[in-house]
Image (cartoon, coloured by chain):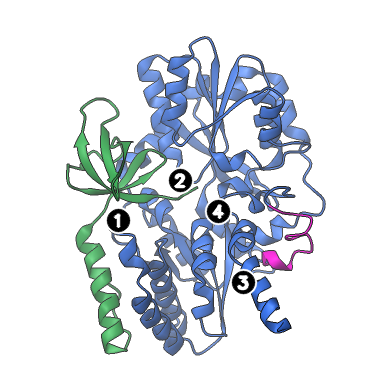
Amino acid sequence: MCLAVPGRVLHIEEGPLLTATVSFGGVTKDVSLVLVPEARVGDYVIVHVGFAISKLDEEAAQRSLDAFAALGELGEPEESAP
Amino acid sequence: MKYVTEFRDSKAARALSEAIRRTVRRPWTVMEVCGGQTHAIVRFGLDALFPPGLTLVHGPGCPVCVTPVGLIDQAIHLASLPGVIFCSFGDMLRVPGSVRDLFAAKAAGGDVRVVYSPLDALTLAQAHLDRQVICFAVGFETTAPAFAAAVVQARRLGVKNFSLLVAHVLVPPAIGAILNAPGNRVQGFLAAGHVCTVMGCKEYDELVRRHRVPIVVTGFEPLDILEGVLLLVRQLEAGRAEVENQYARSVRRQGNPEAQAVLREVFEPVPRAWRGIGEIPQSGLRLRHAYAEFDAIERFGGDVALVGEGGVEDAECRSGLVLQGLLKPPDCPAFGIRCTPERPLGAPMVSSEGACAAYFRYRRRTDSLQEVRHGE
């Protein structure tokens, strides 16, 4: 039920529901940005039941991936969370 | 798919599981709250990567599973009324009511339609002005803002033939109920990342303060869950109890203010019965008085309210224990024999987030393969 999937905003229509075309790995769907009005074309948003519920923080995602990579190379857990 | 595939990398998964093994020195029992996480754990076999002392138990985070039988009976009653189009997410259709499910209501002539979004139901209402369109509003804090936004939009457009049968539930009161239960053995929680995307972390600060348990807000991909577990066992081993945010790419501490605003505008908290668990104070939502015209129970009157009072659950179904993390699905005597996705005794066998469905779908084959190997 709480399944939500990241997709990239391709186009935004003005209007009360801020309907956007969002691409999920090439498959596009109409999504309302009314809960994430700050989202812009090119942003990744996390989409649940037809609504974006957050703008994906790409820097935070990269920090997580970097931390995983470092963990693999060092073989030692870092004390601080990413 | 970007921001999905990278979080399924097997090399990083091994590194994280190694880090978990090195960290764990004592036995711990932790709970993943969300059924989406349960499915990822069972599907990707993440529990096999944990050291023997670390036990993961599955929580009540499946809104379909905890919807009381009385509400399912009301849904079936409404769906069977002439002139009604009843809309629902797909996994609600096979959930058993007292005597039948929504599929049976559809087979008997009820106009039951599966929707992906509350907005699909609103569009149906606009296209069928001579019919009443009722949408089954099921879900946690993640989903409630979408239904709230649909109600606001219906009012803005003057749509008069659209209403909700509200079954929304809230996560923090359920965590509180688990911690307050006499037999509780859960020592730390992975909180549901998408609920916290909407609500933020504040309610969890309060739970940590009151119960001294660590809570890690966690995402849904394998690496998210492994990192969430790592952060949790580090806290447990160090004797810390804090709210940590593993899922920073989506969760901000304050949550999503727009989503919270529309949720509060349209809904208010009420006591709610959870299927298999019982009533939990202030753990559900109902439409506020100002939006009562969109309440299907108000609109369709006394009969519907009465239908909801006589719900009878299957006597053999042990979903209440499963939902509280006290029983693993394969340990239920009915599992896979008298209870299957085609003929379920309870909701966790049919919901896309149900723990029983996860074990049925991903574990039966492995178990039977192992049996074959043993027999060779």
Name the amino acid, label 3: Thr
Q: For the residues marked 2 and 1, what is the alpha-carbon distance in whole angstroms?
A: 15 Å
Lower position in the chain sequence, tag 4 or tag 3: 4
* Letter of the chain shown blue in the rendering: B
Q: Classify mark 3: residues with Cα within 10 Å, few (<14), some (14-19) or many (20+).
A: few
**Residue B141: which disc?**
2
Q: Position of residue B229 (x, y in %)?
A: 44, 74
Which badge, 3 or 1, is on the more N-terminal residue? 1
Left or right: B188 in relation to B158? right
Q: Nearer the viewer, mark 3 or mark 2?
A: 3
Sequence-wise, which precedes: disc 2 or disc 1? 2
Q: Say which residue label 1 marks.
A: B252
In this figure, which residue is indicated by the disc labeled 4? B353
Tag 4: Cα neighbours inside 10 Å, few (<14), some, or many (≥20)?
many
Give the camera-side residue of B184 and B23.
B23
Of label 4 and label 2, which has the lower sequence position? 2
Q: Are marks 1 and 4 on the same chain?
A: yes
In the depicted view, which residue is nearer to us: A24 or B81? A24
Range covered by the magenta-colored residues? B327-340
CA distance for labels 4 and 2:
15 Å
Q: Which residue has dot 3 on it?
A: B366
**SS label for mark 1:** loop
Disc 2 packing (10 Å; few <14; some 14–19; many ≥20): many
Q: Which mark is residue B95?
A: none
